[in-house]
Every structure is written in C-alpha cells, then in structure tokens.
Image: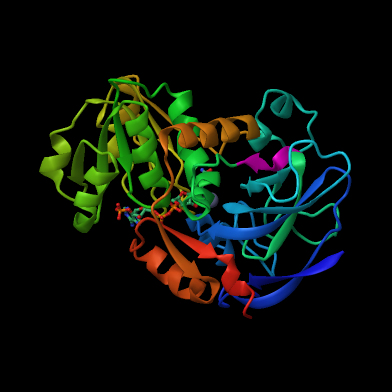
Amino acid sequence: MFKAKAYSAASAISPLALTTIPRRDGTENDVQIEILFCGICHSDLHSVRNEWSEFMPTQYPIVPGHEIVGRVTQVGSAVTKFKPGDLAAVGCMVDSDGTCPECRAGFENFCPNMVLTFNSPDKHLGAVTYGGYSESIVVDQRFVLRVPSNLKPAGTAPLLCAGITTYSPMRRWGVTNGKKVGVVGLGGLGHMAVKLAHAFGAHVVVFTTSPNKKEDAIRLGADEVVISRNADEMQKHAESFDFILDAVSADHDINAYINLLRRDGNLTIVGAPPKPLGVSAFALIMRRRSFSGSNIGGIAETQEMLDFCGKHNITADVEVIPIQKVNEAYERLLKSAVKYRFSIDMASLKSE
Ligand code: NAP
Ligand code: ZN
C-alpha cells in the first residue's frame, strides 16, 4: 500500500478538500497510473452531494472522478497491454466478475458485480474505491484503455464517460448517415453527443435552455438549434426525429421530446436526475415510440469509441482548471455555465 494525494468530500454539504488516500501495491495484473487529467462529470456532483441516495448512497469520504487520462508508471508481471511511459485511460469502472453472461457478452457495465471507479466496495483495501481526483490510481489491465496518440490528454479524459455514454446508445439505436437526431442539453455529455452524431453523418438538432450556446452548438456540429423553452420552435419539429438522446441532469418535461419522435422513433435517456420523470403513455402508444435508458458502455466498446475519436480527431471542448478550483467549478456546473467540460490538470495537486 502507498499513499496518494487526493481531493475528497467528508459529507454531502462539505466542500472538496485535500486529503491523503491509500492505493494498493499493484498485483501481477495491475497497471499503476500517474493521473494527468480528470474530467468533472455531473455524476461526480450528484454523488458528492448524495443526490442519488435512493439508488447508490454515497459513502464518505468520497473521492470522485471517472474520466481519467494518465501516464503508466508501473505494471505487474502479467500485464501485456501496457508498459511504463504509455498514455492510458480509465473510465467509470475498474472491475467486474468477468464470468457472468453480461461480462461474457462485453457488457461489463451491466455486470451485477461491476465495481465503479469511486464509491463501490473495494475488495483490495476494504472501504470504497477512490476515483480520479487524485495523483495516481491502480487498476486491473482489463479496465485500462489505450489512448490514440493524436489526441490531447486534457480533452481525451472526458471521452471516458461523456464520450462512451453518448456513443453507446447512438450505436445501439443505429444513428447513421441521414438519420434525424436530437440532443437535449448541451452540457458535457450533450456536446460529445453532437460531435459524435455529426461524425456518424446524422442531421443533428440541439435542444438547449441556454440561448447563449446557439453558436457553439453549430460550431460543434449541429445542423439546427432549438431553444427548448420556445413552444413554437419545438412544434416545428413535431413527429420528425428518428432518435433523441436526453442528457439533462435535472427535472424536465420528457413528453415534450417524445412527441417530437416519428413512428417507431426512440428517445434514450442518459441523464440521471434523482426524481422520477412522468412519461405519458399516450405520447408513446400513438406512434409506437419507445423510451429507454443507457449506462456508459462496455470496455471493448469504450476502446472502439476512443479509436473512432482518434480517427475523426474528436476530443471534448475543455476548460482546464487546477484542482483548487473544483468547488467553484461545481457551482458553475449547476448553472449550466461550462463550455463544455472541466478537465482538472492534476499537476496542480503536486504543489499542495
Ligand atoms: P452537465 O454538463 O451539467 O450538462 C447538463 C445539461 O443539462 C446542462 O448543460 C443544460 O444544458 C441542461 N440542463 C441543466 N439543468 C436543466 C433544467 N433544469 N432543465 C433543462 N435542461 C437543463 O452534465 P453532464 O455531465 O453532461 O451529465 C448529464 C447527466 O447525465 C447527469 O445527470 C449525469 O449524472 C448523467 N450521466 C449519466 C451517465 C450514464 O451512464 N447514463 C453517464 C454520465 C453522466 P443547456 O444549457 O443546453 O440547456
Ligand atoms: Zn460520468
């Protein structure tokens, strides 16, 4: 065991602050990583403030962070995928049982024994896993991803959650050339969805509550932008979408979007507001529409997404911050005032 600097929260109402956490000495299958950048996902904020207490209660202290890019510093004797000096990435999961039907089908993200990067029971050290707001992490090589060499690390980090969470459902629902695709909420996930859907060749329409994001949406790859609080603008798109991805972090009217789907269209929600949403049966049954959810993606698909982003030169638009600004960053995240993902430069932790 060795000690690592990290930022943690002691309770749902405490700010994140400097602490020291234990990391395990690597086993033969482990990769030890010096973290260079870690993205700030809205899930970090939901978890730090225990907003998901009904579904996954937070155990304190919590060290969030699951959008990790770093440099390999050490590998175990059985590690074949990485060597010291390589760039490597870790997303939302660090382990799974590897034997259940979900794992065998490549869906580690649905394994009943999946271990999340933070706030999951830690079989090595007891207590819970600690995430990427830290100077280092030790992860089984099965859950470590390769980073395409042309992608800059700061903007690559958010691909590990925001990227795969939007890539996976778009692949699942056949987003391709010529499909009309809506993206609801131009935040961290939403802006990745726009870039990816554009790269898939879809006609992309962004729905935003923030009129000041209109120009950015077009620059990111949208063909049209709708201010969702304007009922007339919404009505123009009635019954026209093949697929809509909803990436909103707070309570909102989901039926307004279901009504924009054509026959057999699908709306997939990836946003995780704590309270249930009221879905109208009539909105679904009248056009045989479907409403579904999606949770990150499997490891092979995450690597596929990274390779796709490498090929198409796609990274997140990031605002790089030192870790000392993390609490301020959370307040801006709540105001939808991030363009479009914070990426923490972990070198800032060295000076503490
Ligand atoms: P984010 O950067 O804060 O983006 C959320 C966006 O939602 C905002 O930028 C805003 O976009 C819109 N929004 C916020 N409040 C709203 C409201 N009251 N009404 C309507 N729109 C509102 O968050 P994120 O990191 O992208 O995460 C989004 C959600 O996905 C979170 O709930 C997160 O926990 C969840 N998530 C799920 C998964 C999964 O696997 N399913 C993975 C990661 C994250 P506009 O300004 O454009 O309106
Ligand atoms: Zn996330």
Residue 102 screen position, x and y as percent: 69, 27
Up-down relation of residue 330 to residue 165 (above or below): below
Residue 181 at x, y percent in the picture:
30, 30
Where does residue 265 sit, x and y in percent of width and height?
A: 33, 23
Q: Residue shown at 62%/73% (left/top)?
A: 349
Q: In which quarter of the image is residue 122?
A: bottom right
Membership of 298 in magenta stretch:
no
Residue 321 drawn above or below residue 111: below
Q: In which quarter of the image is the C terminus?
A: bottom right
In the rendered view, tell whether residue 283 sits above or below residue 188. above
Part of the protein shown in magenta: 142-146
**x 56%, y 59%: residue:** 37
| Left/right of residue 305 with respect to residue 190 in the rendered view | right
Point 86% across, 58% down: residue: 25
The percent position of residue 24, horizontal first and vertical second, equals 84, 59
Colour mode? rainbow
